Image: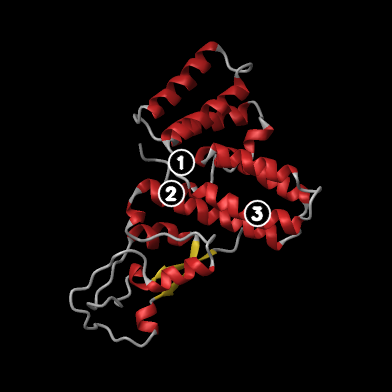
Amino acid sequence: MDEKIKLGISSCLLGNKVRFDGGHKFDPFLVNTLGHFVEYVPVCPDVESGFPVPREEGMAEKNGVGIFARALMERLPLLPVEEEGRLQDIQLRENFIVRVFAYRRWRELVDGAAAAGRLVDFQRRHKLLLMAHSLEMARQLGKLTALAGARPMGDILPAYEKLFMAALKQKATVRKNVNVLQHMFGYFKKQLDDFEKKELLAVIENYRQNLIPLIVPLTLLKHYIDKFKQPYLSDQYYLDPHPLELKLRNHA
């Protein structure tokens, strides 16, 4: 994944003065933080359609999704898309970015030799991440993956992709994350001493009460994964679904 992800973006969010009033809506996070990991493809349908800047629009309003965005979503319904206003919400921002990086991994699988074994490994590594978004859909994806090898991959892959992206579009709530953290804790019950167990459970409980961010229990769990060399957990994308530099899990 050395090549940057190409990500379409409204040109005004990059600071380009293309809005109807001649202004822009520069977004520091998108440009200065996420911008290090993606290659933006700026889009401004109005300007590219020949409209001037500034342009007369009377009392400009934005209600719902624009024509261009709607057409894009209808043409590519599984593509991660989000409105810039909603990206100001930390949870929605992380949800979108989780989908962006997951979709990249999916496209790499499909563009390569998408054999049954690779799909099984893909599902295994995404299991905990999927559980944090939708436990029911995670189970459905597990059942679908079990059919790989018995049914043509040409039938399995489209169905898997649709369900995979639908699952990740569900919010990863504190309750769902706690369920995953406790599931991970179960792998160390026989290896941790009483003090370590109490400490880990206390940290998970503090997260459940919104006293600390998700990064805290995850950091402690990563320590035990390395210490006890737990192979199943070590390559779970749930631990790092996106670059740590984005600090999306640092908010309580």
Q: Which residue is mark 1?
A: 172
Q: Which element carries disc 1, helix, strand or loop?
A: loop
Residue projecting furthest to the left: 59
The image quadrant of residue 67 is bottom left
Between residue 159 and residue 40, name the one nearer to us: 159
Dot 2 or dot 3: first in sequence order is 2
| Residue at 49% over, 59% down | 80
Q: What residue do we see at 66% from left, 30% from top?
A: 230
Q: Work out whether mark 1 precedes mark 2 in sequence or the reverse, and give the earlier one.
A: 2
Asked if the residues shown at circle 1 and circle 2 are in contact, with their CB atoms under 8 angstroms apart, the answer is yes
Quadrant of the rendered image containing residue 70: bottom left
Q: Which residue is mark 2?
A: 94
Callout 3 secondary element: helix
At numbered mark 2, what does the secondary structure look like: helix, strand or loop? helix
Q: Amino acid at mark 3?
A: Ala
Left or right: where 7 falls relative to 206: right
Front residue of 32 and 6 = 6
Of the numbered discs 1 and 3, the one sitting upstream in the chain is 3
**For the image shown, how many numbered marks are present on the structure?**
3
Compared to 172, does 111 lie above or below? below
The residue under label 3 is 159
> Residue 176 appears at what percent x and percent y?
47, 34
Spot occupied by residue 136 in the image (x, y as percentages of width and height): 56, 38
Q: Single out the mark in the foreground, 1 or 2.
A: 1
Which residue extends farthest top? 194
> In the image, what residue type sits under mark 2?
Glu
